[in-house]
Image: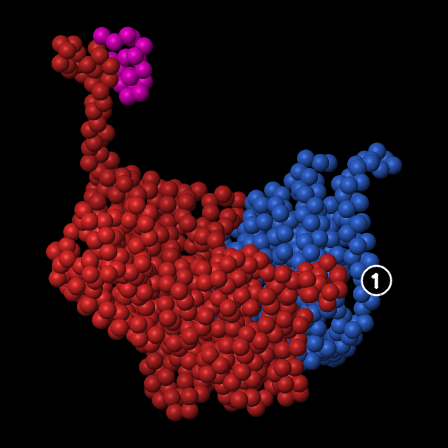
Chain colours: A blue, B red
Amino acid sequence: MAGTDSAPRSFQEIILRLQSYWGARGCAVLQPYDMEVGAGTFHPATTLRSLGTRPWAAAYVQPSRRPTDGRYGENPNRLQHYYQYQVLIKPSPPDLQDLYLGSLEAIGIDTSLHDIRFVEDDWESPTLGAWGLGWEVWCDGMEVSQFTYFQQVGGHDCHPVSGELTYGLERLAMYVLGINHVMDMPFNDPAAPIPLTYGDIFRQTEQEYSRWNFDQADTAMLLKHFEDAEAECDRILTAAQPDKAGRTIVMAHPAYDQCIKASHLFNLLDARGVISVTERQAYIGRVRALAKRCADAFVTTEAGGGQAA
Amino acid sequence: MPDLLIELFSEEIPARMQPRAREDLRKLVTDGLVEAGLTYAHAAAFSTPRRLTLAVEGLSAESPTLREERKGPRADAPAAAIEGFLRATGLTRDRLEERADKKGGATLFAVIEKPGRRAPEIVAEVLERVIRSFPWPKSMRWGAGSLRWVRPLHSILCILTTEAGAEVVPLTVDGIAAGNTTRGHRFMAPAAFPVTSFDDYAAKLRAARVILDPAEREAAIWHDATTQAFAQGLEVVEDRGLLAEVAGLVEWPVVLMGPIGEDFLGLPPEVLQTSMKEHQKFFSVKNPRTGRIEKFITVANRETADHGATILQGNGKVLAARLSDARFFWENDLRTVHAIGLKGMAEGLKAVTFHNKLGSQYERIERIAALAAEIAPIVRAEPDEADLAARVAKADLQSAMVGEFPELQGTMGGYYARAAGLPEAVANACKAHYQPLGPSDDVPTEPVSVAVALADKIDTLTGFWAIDEKPTGSKDPFALRRAALGVIRLVLDNGVRLGMLDYMHTHLGTVQKSIASAGARAAGRDTGSVVKTVYQVTRPHPDGRQVDVNATDLLSFFHDRLKVFLKDQGIRHDIIDACLAMPGNDDLTLLVKRAEALSAFLATEDGKSLLRGFKRTNIVSKEQSKDNVEYSFGFDEKFFEYEAETALFAALDAAEARIAPAMTAEDFPAAMAAMAALRAPIDAFFTAVQVNSANEIVRRNRLNLLHRIRAICLQVADLTKVEG
């Protein structure tokens, strides 16, 4: 198998190997979604494409933001901005576990020397109205991936079921490369003319964003933006009039963008500590309501396997 | 007699679901087979992370032929009636039998013979039904199929083995056709292989690096773990739950022991143990000389060429990262405690809602502190110390460590209290005040712990009673039954003399204030003005006190729990009822003392015959009292006609002289022994004397005498409630 004979030397090499591995197994290698999201699952290539009956196979890197996880670049493992590698195949193929294990080999994990385990871990996203069953995958006691069979997304039963793989890239790469602090991890080849570490690229941004997330973000403005996003999502889903050319196009994706925005704004508000325990549930419920309506809209479209268009 | 072997091979089954699934598979399949008319000798179920297996020995090869006879209409009945019978039986007219009846006519009979069916046919039917309706706690679909299983089901092995060989049971479920093959260990022997019998299956699996029997895996893990620890003079901390879970995570257990970094050995052992268990499913290995946890044991699922070196190194690294977190929390918490004290830490609980109707955790702590100080003298604790203990006992809910490991609540509080230099009794109360956590948990005995534990539970109960969140049926989300049982055990084990009603009544007043403030806050009103308007709905108690209705209701809840508790100790419910009817029944220690004495007394011959005498007295005086005259005005010796009357009178005097001081001293056995002395005189009285005399004065006198017997006996317990 290509690439397994040599150990990867950098963060980017691990990403590239995953890209070529899944690309070679028939996945469309997509690019990250161009919006702030909390996890790779939020990419419409997962959330929306896991709905409906049309087959799908995609793999991509997704930069993800979790404002509350910021540690000013000081914690060896925690970041407010990090990368997830996401694979979604619908319907889930019967050999998905073997395919997954092959991807570990591809990035230099010799499964004959390591202890790989599938440990029960059910996945639920209250903001997406989604859940699935699966495992966290352990390599020598460390969680290296999340493996989920989607059962419901946006309140819709998944038929057929998608298999989703999520790799926490930094943690996985640190393990493979034998690095103890994320900021010390080589991002490109350490033998390159200009070797760059993860810290060279992200230490400063982690500091800046940690400060903004925790202390400076204008909560009144964020709150307003949240409400704007919510209102816009609602408006474009209910816009029934035909456009100038006389077409009535369901705007599931633009509406879903607003849902993603609302979700991220909620995360920012949460990091600023202005949301109480009881309010939290209410906010999550509001985002979920948007996600559900976007899902409702998507399944009526052609891509969603519906009747429209 | 064929043997049946079933294996349902899937992706990894959660460890916690395997024991129940084994039992369900065994029961559902064997019940189905028996229902279909088959018999079997023995059935056993097994599981590994990837398979559920059932082996049934000595299954009958086919079900017996069944003959069913149904009576129909008379042979000369209208055609419509006969046709109806034919439809119902599915037979044609020529297949019906005509039998002569008593009236000289003929009646139609249908004889339906259900031929026996072969075992494979039945097994296929039963197994498909079981697979399709298997009661997994959570199940899922996968791919494009519609079948539900705990995780994707990959193959079904289903064979019947006889001396002639093995036969695959014809069966297809959602596209999965049953066969005679399975697979070995995911990594070490992944190839498929056929099997011919259970023994062949188990042996081939073993060769393919799978130990089928979870009990065998458990035993192997425990054996290897203890042996490795022992070799280094250490011992494994026993944890049966963890052992069962780990055995459910591996098919080929390989036990590896590794060191815990020097940097972390200073952490409290509970922290090491919890972190290792919760996050990594590691066993803790203790040094018996120091009591410290010095090593960890992990159970891998495979052998490797480097004898587990890579695996152990990886696990050690993950553990170090986890323990770095734990140490960070520990050091951070200690800094907080040194800076602002444990009381300061508890201040943070002002922002934590306990229940939206009952206010914050902090308000709750204030209520508990007040009550604990009040209870303190009764349990021989210093009120100030009880107050302090209550105020700091929950402070650790604000600590980083408990935030990460909620199960360390109380335990961490104890460490932090000692670090803050608080008295040992206060530190101990941090953990002990939550106890007893269940029927088998220890009951605190230290006075300060007892005071706070009682106050904590009484506050919980009165609070949820006041907002009408009582347990109903199987629903008890706030674990109020456990809290009530906790109070009962605390009181009884420590011999606490507490008149519960007064304390609950007063405490309900405090609770009502919290409820009013919480309500006012929710409505955005000023809390100060509302608190004054608090009122309690009261009800007169039999002794004349006005008591909060929730307190009386709670008391009967306690009594119900107490009945369950005492029943387990072998005290009959009617004996408890007899004692519950007595005054002072809110003093549980007194109540149980009485019940135990009565139970012991009624187990003796004296007790039994006294009870008979009492019952007779009771019946006679009831029958004779139908004239609605009150027979409690004493009696006069001069109207005695028989020796037995005089003797009984004397015995009553003597008994009363002994009973009164015994009752004052709450010496129920002595009081009952004195009552026992009445048994012979009562028996003699009834033998010699006819109560119903023609002489009205004599009759009345005798009834008054009987009344005195009743009165004396009823002082001890309400014997009318005792059965027998």
- The crowding category of the residue bearing disc 1, from other C-alpha atoms within 10 Å (few below 14, some 14 to 19, many at least 20), is few
Q: Nearer the viewer, residue B674 or B36?
A: B674
Q: Position of residue A30 (x, y in %)?
A: 69, 56
Q: Is residue B697 magenta?
A: no
How many numbered discs, if any? 1
> Label 1 lies in what chain?
A
Q: Nearer the viewer, residue A137 or A231?
A: A231
Which quarter of the image is occupied by the C terminus of chain B?
bottom left
Q: Position of residue B216 (x, y in %)?
A: 30, 67
Magenta-tinted stretch: B76-94
Q: Position of residue B627 (x, y in %)?
A: 30, 45
Quarter-wise, where is residue A178 in the image?
bottom right
Residue at image location 15% in from the left, 57% down from the top: B641
Name, please, the residue furthest toward the right: A244
Residue type at mark 1?
Met
The correct choice, above or below, for B375 with respect to B463 in the image is below
Visible residue check, residue B397:
no
Magenta stretch: dominant secondary structure: helix
Which residue position holds label 1? A221
Q: Nearer the viewer, residue B648 or A309?
A: B648
Quarter-wise, where is residue B606 in the image?
bottom left
Name, please, the residue furthest toward the front: B638
Q: Is residue B272 left or right of residue A55?
A: left
Q: Position of residue B702 (x, y in %)?
A: 22, 55
Mark 1 falls on what kind of element?
Answer: helix
Q: Is residue B341 left or right of residue B54?
A: right
